[in-house]
Amino acid sequence: MNIVTFQVPAISCGHCVKTIEMELGETEGIINVLADVESKTVVVNYQEPASERKLRELLSDINYPAQES
């Protein structure tokens, strides 16, 4: 099991949070998703077949790209 935190500057409201949590939550291998509008972060608890790369791509696909670290 892995945990990754993404900085997502585009998070600006509760709708953003719900969209991110719903979209990522439907991905195979995702255990838990917690997005936060105040810190503009997304914390994902996952296992295979999900990966950090796939999660980053999915965030971009739904118009919430993560900042490069």
Image: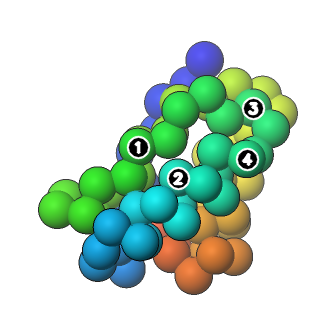
Residue occupying image coordinates x 60% and y 17%: 1
**Residue 19, how many percent across, how many down?**
54, 66
Q: Nearer the viewer, mark 3 or mark 4?
A: 4
Residue occupying image coordinates x 50% and y 41%: 33
In screen coordinates, is 8 left or right of 65?
Answer: left
Picture quadrant of residue 67: bottom left
For disc 1, the neighbor class at 10 Å (few under 14, some 14 to 19, many from 20) is some
Q: Looking at the image, can residue 63 be seen?
A: yes
Q: Secondary structure at mark 4?
A: loop
Say which amino acid is labelled 3.
Answer: Gly
Q: Earlier in the sequence, mark 3 or mark 2?
A: 2
Q: Can you identify the residue that label 3 sits on?
A: 29
Q: Nearer the viewer, residue 29 or 7?
A: 29
Q: Earlier in the sequence, mark 1 or mark 3?
A: 3
Q: Secondary structure at mark 2?
A: helix
Count of picture labels: 4
Picture quadrant of residue 34: top left
Say which amino acid is labelled 2.
Answer: Glu
**Residue 61, how many percent across, how many down?**
69, 76
Q: Quadrant of the C terminus?
A: bottom left
Q: Nearer the viewer, residue 52 or 15?
A: 15
Q: CA distance from mark 3 to mark 2?
A: 14 Å
Q: Secondary structure at mark 1?
A: strand
Say which amino acid is labelled 4.
Answer: Glu
Say which amino acid is labelled 1.
Answer: Leu
Q: Earlier in the sequence, mark 4 or mark 1?
A: 4
Q: Can you identify the residue that label 2 sits on?
A: 21
**Residue 27, how many percent across, how many down?**
75, 46
Q: Secondary structure at mark 3?
A: loop
Q: Can you identify the residue that label 4 sits on?
A: 26
Q: CA distance from mark 3 to mark 4?
A: 9 Å
